[in-house]
Amino acid sequence: MKRAAIGCAVLSLAMVVPAHADIDTSGLRLRVGGVYPFEQPTRRVTGNMIGIGLEFPLKVLSTVNQTYLSLDWLGKSGSGAKGNMFPFMVNQRYYLDKNPENGTRNYFFAGVGGVSIDVNKSKIAYGARLGLGRDFGENLFAEGTLLFSSDAAGAKANSFGVYLGYRF
């Protein structure tokens, strides 16, 4: 039942955003990295975590910066045991370099949304993320991310992650 509720929440967010913008799948981004939880109660259950994320670009008014939907999985293993978090956010990426050389450019990003936290008990909490990234040419990028959330049954998703990614 809980998984169905989480799935419905993610699906409803994914359906509401495209109602206001067209999804461009050509800019899909996949990232993989390591995540360190800040909160001791969370870290006791999860330890350091694996992070896998997908980003779906959205076509909106801005042509310089980029709005996108991000869906992530943060977990200690793929076994289905407690210790998983699923952030789903609407984000804005702000490019810091006006004239990138050889496709390399730096950016700052920030996003808001929710986090399904399954550490002590499954619960959806408010969340936000921000960070810095660098594009290394047309396809490769790296990011450092801070994730924050409200309390969910004694656990929070507050963490720092380092990712390496690929743009399709």
Image (cartoon, grey):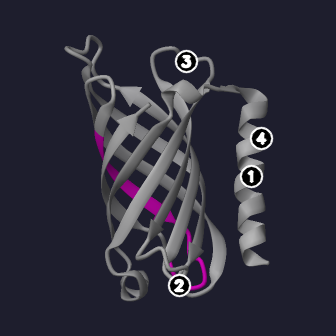
Q: Is residue 78 above or below residue 33?
A: below
Return the disc, 2 or 3, that comes first in the chain's sequence: 3
**Which of the 4 quarters of the picture holds residue 57?**
top right
- The disc placed on residue 62 is 3
Q: Is residue 22 magenta?
A: no
- The disc placed on residue 81 is 2
Residue at (37% x, 88% y) in the render: 44
Q: Is residue 31 above or below residue 103?
A: below
Return the disc, 1 or 3, that comes first in the chain's sequence: 1
Return the disc, 4 or 2, that comes first in the chain's sequence: 4
Instruction: Give the residue number, with chain letter if any, for mark 4.
Output: 16
Callout in the foreground (1, 3): 1
> Mark 1 to mark 2: distance in Å?
23 Å
> Mark 1 to mark 3: distance in Å?
25 Å
Return the disc, 4 or 3, that comes first in the chain's sequence: 4
Q: Secondary structure at mark 2?
A: loop
> Mark 4 to mark 1: distance in Å?
9 Å
- Classify the position of the N terminus by image quarter: bottom right
Q: Secondary structure at mark 1?
A: helix
Q: Secondary structure at mark 4?
A: helix
Instruction: Give the residue number, with chain letter if any, for mark 1.
Output: 11
Give the extent of the magenta segment: 142-155
Q: Are marks 4 and 2 in contact (CB under 8 Å)?
A: no
- The amino acid pointed to by label 3 is Ser
Q: Are marks 4 and 1 in contact (CB under 8 Å)?
A: no
- Classify the position of the C terminus by image quarter: top left
> In x, y percent, where is residue 87?
55, 59
Q: Is residue 110 above or below residue 134?
A: below
Return the disc, 4 or 1, that comes first in the chain's sequence: 1
